[in-house]
Image (tube, grey):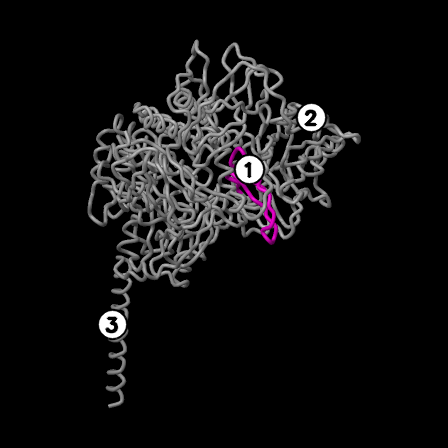
Amino acid sequence: MRQIEKSTHFNYFVFSAFKFLLLLTLILSTISKGKVSAQTAYFVDGFHGGIWGHYPKGYTSYIVAQLNKHPDWKINLEIEPETWDRVERLDNKAYSDLKAFLTDKSRNGRIEYVNPAYGQSYMYNISGESIISQFNYGIKKLRQHFPSLEFSTYSSEEPCFTSALPQILKSFGFKYASLKNPNTCWGGYTSAFGNGLVNWIGPDGTKILAVPRYEFETLKPNSTWETIGNANSPAYIDDAFKNGVQSPVGMCLQDAGWQLGPWLKNNFYQPSQYTTWKNYFENINPNHANATDWRFSQEDVKVGLVWGAQVLQRIAQEVRIAENKIVQAEKIAAFRSIDNKSNYPSNTLEKAWQPLLLAQHHDCWIVPYNGKKGDTWADKVKGWTAFTDSKSDSIMLVENKPSTTIPALKVYNTTLYDRQEWIDVKLPKGWDAAKTVVLDKDGIELPTQPATDKTSDALLFKGFVPSAGYSFFHLKKKKPSIIAGANIKKLENGDFQLETDLYRLIIDPKHGGVIKELIAKQLKNKNFVDTASAFGFNQLRGNFFNKGGFHSSADSPAKVRIVKNGPAQISLAIDGQIAGEPYTQTISLNQGQKRIDLSVKIDWKSIEGIGEFAETDYQAAKRKKAFYNDRYKLLTLFPLSLKGQKVFKNAPFDVMESKLENTFFSSWDSIKNNVILNWVDVVDENNAFGCAMYTDHTTSYTHGQDFPLGLNIQYVGKGLWGRNYNTEGATEISYALIPHFGDWKKAELWKESELINEPLQTALVPENIKNKQKSFFKTTAKGWVLSSCTIDGNDLLLRIFNAEGTAQKSRIDFAFKPTAAISEQLNGTLIEKLLIEKTKNGSFTTLSIPPMGFKTIRLKHVK
């Protein structure tokens, strides 16, 4: 009996074990087929590049062949829109096949287009209007090839992110975004945040659902270009499950040209399923209600370019000039179109925008030397921006006509502010600046000054031009009246004093021409120079590692030359040497102008290393690199007498308070956002006083508890991929300072930036004038910016950005009577109809715009 019982127990055990093994086999089989979603990981694969970056002939045939070979494979495309023009010509069969894939309307389509930007820009380094144009012209080009193409998710292989993207993306119809770039972090990456979906909140409050770089998604060991999320390694996915991520996702948009097929190879987590981003958001991870809010700031974009390199400075300057010019050209062309019913040059402007958008391509900024000699990215940028400048100038200066009659001056103001300022004009042949006066619309003589001592055809005069409009001024041959005003004088101790109605500056030639005093007369006579600092104000200082270490312009005396001596404008040049290299700094002030203009030119006689150290053993995977640490680069410094300093800085459609203790880092794994787009503002702990620094190009700035505000002037040494970043010719940079009361809003610093970006534009015209002065639109709303003004058919499109104001409703007046006013999205979708009320000479409407938000207004039938 016991033997039978024992045998029965044994058989039962064997049978139970067999059932367990069978069940385990079924479970494992089910998991391997991806049917247990809680244990399945996902991967975003696809391609990145284009004909300007990398897209070999015939590559579309390869993509289509791989899609047919791997029916479970899904891809995401970030391909430059211009690429398809060539593909259609040279690889037409594959072009048609890919088009068929892209027009698949099912929810689980095989392909999603995730970045339609025309030039794949980094976004954080250009203007808000440039970002809008990147999408606008990119989408337009793509829909020429793929008319039914939809855009649901924004994603990029590079760190192409900026804080204001949520409102731009949502306005173009995007629903989702990815903040990952796991396989191309050379130029930077985003902050790690959260363990699942997030609501990426922009500065205006707009939310867009996004996947972040997860909190546990660390930077990959022995790498300076990857996170651990680039290939769905078992460790990465295991960490995801441990951190509560139910549907973890990795990503790599392969460089177009790679022929590796589906990305996941060898030791990757299984089961991993390929997905498009749209499918991931809508089918795999649809529980959007649990998304965590994230106020993603500009400092969450960690940026590690070779700031201070001369080649990058020039690219940034060329782009800045071109993007400012084309926006002004659009506005002036629109003004003329409304005024004269003239044709709006839409085609010319589109052709002018396209090369500029390519000049904003991320490859221009991260690999500027790549390409054949004479055809590098830097060479391309020079040509592209020159084309844009030429087209913009031709539009703005079209009214310059030679005339036998006495000419008049037509001066355009493209900002939304009335402007009373000094205007620079080149006189026509036969006119002498020393014997010419300018009369306003009422015939009143205006203050004047010859603009330069070297030529007689340049004149400065102070005139009024209303917002978004123009004023006419008359020339008259007459000797101007002598007026009192700004002046420079040499003091008994050898110092130089520059004085206007707003400022008094003392320059010390014995110590390289540093500014000893900067007295702001209307700011309680405050001296903004920290006289206790070890650093000189406007001092040049850097580590010349081949010349014994740190050198300063204050180490040796300089010669000072008076260039202009009032009464309208004063200018002084400082000629000195630093480490044996000759430099010239200039300081210019205008009577009545808040901005102090400065510049530096360094005529390099030798190629000297400037930076933290000489990088003799460059290794791509080594995290510490010389070009990271700005503390050792050549800087111009501004020690400010402000206690408890706080830093604010602008970004595209954004202003943020910095949370950085200092701007310095020396390693790839500790990158900070130390970027200055247009301006950085330092204020004291009570927001009583501040001083803003403006720059003529996107670069980096310095600041810390033990280090003053500074501007990056030069780095010379090895950069990314071991390339030598040297100097060729002179380095020339312009910058400016604005001391002020209160915080950046009270000081209207965004307005001041607009005045720099959009100078008054002057045209010589015959004197047969109908309208002496005109404002096409004006508002009393504080902080509103005329971001864009264009013509679309018979309609006027205005874009207003609220830089400093509140969200309360405000009025905007028009000098014409449109048939209707509509607030619309960037993709043309109606938001709301606005009430138009007529006035004696035009009309007006009221609307509200959230702070840091913009609205696009279509005014119907203004032509």
Q: Could you say where residue 511 lies in the image, as x and y percent from the top left?
A: 74, 33
Look at 38% across and 63% down and name the residue there: 244
Q: Which residue is mark 2?
A: 575
Instruction: Judge by depth and name the residue closer to the eye, 265 or 659.
Output: 659
Amino acid at pointer 2: Asp
Q: Could you say where residue 668 lies in the image, as x and y percent from the top left?
A: 53, 46
Identify the element where label 1 is drawn: strand
Which residue appears farthest toward the right when viewing the image? 493
Q: Residues within 10 Å of mark 1 (few under 14, many from 20)?
A: many
Q: Which residues are magenta?
A: 675-701
Q: Is residue 86 visible?
A: yes
Residue 695 placement: quadrant: top right
Amino acid at pointer 1: Tyr
Residue 577 placement: quadrant: top right
The answer to whether 176 is drawn above or below residue 512 in the figure is below
**Which tag, 2 or 3, sits closer to the chain's start?**
3
Q: Could you say where residue 789 lies in the image, as x and y percent from the top left?
A: 36, 34
Q: Which residue is mark 1?
A: 694
**Prevailing secondary structure class for the magenta stretch in the rendered image:** strand
